[in-house]
Amino acid sequence: MYKILFLILFILDSVFPKVFVKKEICITVDDLPYIARYHYNIQYGKIITDSLLSNFKQFNVIALGSVNSSQLYELNRLNRSKVLMLERWLDSGMVLANHTYSHKNLYTISVKEYIKDVIDGEIILKDIINERGKELKYFRHPYLLKGETKEKADSINSFLKSRGYIETPVTIDNYDYYFSLAFERAMLKNDEQLMNKIGKDYIIYMEDALKYYEAQSIALFGYNIKHIIILHANIINAYYIRDLLNMLQRNGYKFISIEEALKDKCYESKDEFYQNKGVSWLRRWAWTLGYRDDIFFNGEPEIPDYINKMIGK
Ligand SMILES: [Zn+2]
């Protein structure tokens, strides 16, 4: 009798988690209020903001938006409509993070300069968050660079901690900005057929990226972690965020906040990846543990050739 009961429990335990435990993902959007190459104007800024926020609402997404405050200024004057866009993010229940003032490349500057850019990044952002009774506590590294030497990485890390920041890792890295640039070029030519093709291929590419990093998560930790995906507040996501969120749901994902995502123990893993490369944290952790094999360092989903050609890569 006990043997049968034990067997039933064993089967339930091994089958049910795989069937019923929802996969979880936190959506993060960088370079707020918005970013574009050829359509960098208030009109498109509004289109991007409207589309992201209305779809987040519909899909119950609490996204993390990472802000570059320098973007709020035009010819040294504060642009109120851009501040308003950030306020709309907050008032829609989203969380905002500091992404430095001007998005400098850490590899090309000193720790001192980087720290200044972090502090300058608090301008406006801190005020609009505080006005709503909340605190600015999250930080996203531009280009996902954390320092190419141990000394540099340690100095920046302890500065961020002392200022009360929580770093926001990325596990599902991707090249959404390549697709966005190609899409913008197709828009300039009014080539609707090409725009549709790029959009479709973008979702296929993002699904491949999702599966690629899911496999890494299972290889490294033995389970599918609470993922954090990076997107940008750009044109391709303005047009395709709905398809993207649908794709994630189709793959069994539930949307969670950054606070919820960071509860996963995986984010306590050691990171000793001291290189001038912005990569997924899964790769950082794998490198730190001594892995150098194909699962973690090869086979990344490819960008279609025509996209590379369109953007001169
Ligand atoms: Zn960025």
Image (spheres, rainbow, N blue to C red):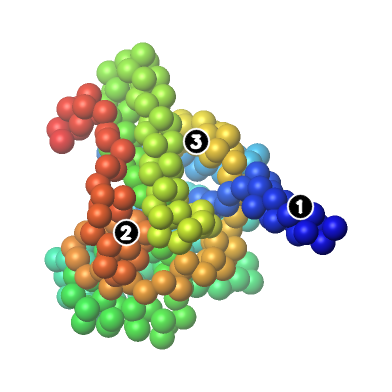
State the residue position of label 1.
8
Tell me: residue 249, above or below residue 165: above
Q: Amino acid at mark 2?
A: Arg
Q: Quadrant of residue 209?
A: top left
> Visible in this render: residue 261?
yes
Q: Secondary structure at mark 2?
A: helix
Nearer to us of marks 2 and 1 is 1
Q: Amino acid at mark 1?
A: Ile
Neighbours of disc 2 within 10 Å: few (<14), some (14-19), many (20+): many
Which is nearer the eye, 185 or 230?
Answer: 230
Which is nearer the eye, 88 or 3?
Answer: 3
Q: Residue at x 27, y 18 (%)?
A: 189
Nearer to us of marks 1 and 3 is 1
Q: Position of residue 206 (x, y in %)?
A: 41, 37
Q: Amino acid at mark 3?
A: Leu
Which is nearer the eye, 35 or 270?
Answer: 270
Tell me: residue 191, above or below residue 235: above
Q: Residue at x 41, y 55 (%)?
A: 219
Mark 2 and mark 3 lie on one chain; the one further toward the N terminus is: 3
Q: Position of residue 280 (x, y in %)?
A: 34, 56
Q: Quadrant for the N terminus, please.
A: bottom right
Task: Using the image, tell me which numbered label, if any, was put on residue 283.
Answer: 2
Mark 2 and mark 1 lie on one chain; the one further toward the N terminus is: 1
